[in-house]
Each structure stands twice: as structure tokens, then as C-alpha cells.
Amino acid sequence: MDKRRILILGGTTEARELARRLAPRDDFDVTLSLAGRTIDPAPQPVPVRTGGFGGAAGLADYLAANGIDLLIDATHPFARQISVNAEQAADRAGTPRIRLERTGWQAVDGDRWTRVATLADAVGALGAEPRRVFLAIGRQEAFHFNAAPQHYYIVRSVDPVEPPLTAPSVDYILARGPFAVEEETALLRDHRIEVVVSKNSGGEATYAKIAAARALSIPVILVDRGRQGGVTTAETVEEALRLIDHVASAGRKRGV
Ligand code: NAP
């Protein structure tokens, strides 16, 4: 039996988990693609290719040249460009595409959330008065907060923020999740944090800061994700596995 070739666009826990579940299958040949942002990425269960493709055209060329039967966009909900590229490339190459995107967090009793559309809006939502801010948004977009230098920031990221922020009062914490609620609560309390800024990433690995903020009654400025329409979307790895089997068997029946 010919193996179906799958390319997973990754950089998320879900992508790694999906690859782990597909790795033992002898009907699939799976490659995981990483952007190469993390200096020391976690080990992966399938062959990995690293680095950009050169836009949608480059990705379309890759799909065609490598005979990819199915493209799975399992990138982070806030990695918007690569998802746009995936859509255009799949159209161009005629490759079926599935999106794997975990659902966002929902507010529960005790949450004090201000929801904003963009990180620039999050900067504005901090207000004019100096506050002690926990920035848990990754390193690539922390620069937005240079626009509000009156605040004190703690920035947590896996790799260092380069270049460092120009805002005068910043401390950096290097750490990789998952984080426990107890440690997040201690961090917020020890640093006398007054407001948390987070993306609505969903998932469990980074939810502890939201639970800790709730426990301490600290407000959270939460950046919402954009909506991606027009693509079959799985919210869990289990659901993605079902869709993959469905697409693969439909392809076999058509003899492609
Ligand atoms: P992005 O802005 O959507 O993508 C920028 C460029 O990076 C893309 O145009 C593409 O370059 C390359 N790229 C992104 N993901 C790739 C992948 N999986 N494989 C190969 N090339 C990729 O993405 P980002 O926000 O910088 O995120 C980069 C990676 O980190 C993503 O894989 C994402 O899943 C992960 N991540 C992002 C966040 C976040 O908050 N943004 C959080 C956690 C993890 P070319 O155009 O040259 O192909």
C-alpha cells in the first residue's frame, strides 16, 4: 500500500501530539515543519524540517515537489501569516488541508478579563497610570509595550527578548511551560503584579496564569484570536485523527 504523505505545520503541543499519534501508522509518512524560532526545540516523534518555505508560493512548491497528500495546519492560533500561506499554498497545489486549532479559554466566575483584538489594543488597555504588568505573550511581540514605558513589566518567554525592550523598567524570566497554578500564583504575588497580559491561546499548558490571576483577583487583558473561515477544523488531536482518516480514505477511493 502506498503511504499517504502528510505535512504538519507545527510549533504547538497539539502538532507534536498529533505527530506522535501518527508516527506508528504504516499507512502514513509524516513530516513536521517548524519555523525554527525556538533555539532548543523539544524532541519530535517524526522527521522534522525547519525554517520558512518562502511564502505561500514556496510552500506550494514544497507540497508539489514532495508529493504531499494532506496538509495539516496545526500552528498556533496567533501565528497568522503561516495559516494564510497554508490556505493559499493548498489551493495552488490542489492539496487537501485541515486546520487543527484548540479552542480559546472561556471566562468563568471570578475572572476579571478585558478582551481586546490586538496587542496594540492591549497596550492601550493598560491605561496611563503606571502599573505592574506580567507580560506572558512570548518574545516576538513584546516590543509593542515599548509604547507604554510608564509601566513596570515582567516578560516571560522561552528564549530571550531580542532586542530587549526600551521601556526602562523591565525584568525578564526565561521559562518553558507547562506551569503549575501554585508557581504562577507565587510569581504574581511575589512581584506584586497588578495586571496580566495574555493571548487567548487556549489549551492547558499556559492556563495556570489565568487561574492564578483569578485566585488573586488580578485583572487580565486578553487578546482575542482572529477567525479563520473556510477550512475543515478540528479542535482536538482526536478529532484531527478522525478527519485525517476520512480525507485519506476519500483520496484512496478517488485513486489519488
Ligand atoms: P507567523 O507570523 O504566522 O509566520 C511567519 C513566517 O514564519 C511564515 O510566513 C513562515 O515563513 C514561517 N513559519 C511559521 N510557522 C512555520 C512552520 N510551522 N513551518 C515553517 N515555517 C513557518 O508565525 P509566528 O507567529 O512567527 O510563529 C512561528 C511559529 O511559532 C509557528 O510555527 C507557531 O506555531 C509557533 N508559535 C507561535 C506562537 C504565537 O503566539 N505567534 C505561540 C507559540 C508557538 P515563510 O513565509 O518563509 O514560509
Image (spheres, rainbow, N blue to C red):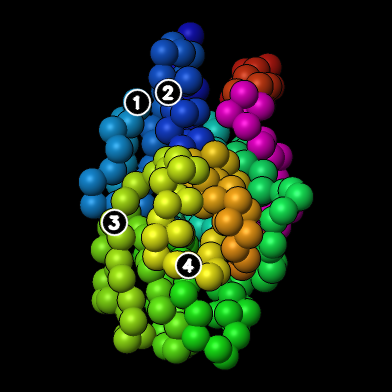
Tell which circle, 2 or 4, labels the residue nearer the N-terminal end.
2
Label 3, ligand 1: CB separation under 8 Å: no
Q: Image height check: is 116 above or below 229?
A: below
Label 4 vs label 3: CA separation?
17 Å
Q: Quadrant of the C terminus?
A: top right
In the picture provided, is 159 more to the left or to the right than 3?
A: left
Q: Are marks 4 and 3 in contact (CB under 8 Å)?
A: no
Q: Are marks 4 and 1 in contact (CB under 8 Å)?
A: no
Q: Where residue 236 appears, x then y in whole percent?
A: 63, 32
Label 4 vs label 1: CA separation?
38 Å
Q: Image height check: is 204 above or below 115?
A: above
Residue 144 appears in the rendering: no
Label 2, ligand 1: CB separation under 8 Å: no
Say which of marks 4 and 3 sits in front: 4
Identify which residue is drawn at 50% across, 86% down. Answer: 130
Say which of marks 3 and 1 sits in front: 3
Check disc 2: other Cα within 10 Å, few if <14, some if 14-19, many if 20+: some
Quickly name the residue at label 2: 20
Tell which circle, 2 or 3, labels the residue nearer the N-terminal end.
2
Quickly name the residue at label 3: 174
Magenta residues, start to end? 225-240
The label shown at residue 45 is 1
Quickly name the residue at label 4: 193
Q: Nearer the viewer, residue 70 or 241?
A: 241
Say which of marks 4 and 1 sits in front: 4
Label 2 vs label 4: CA separation?
38 Å
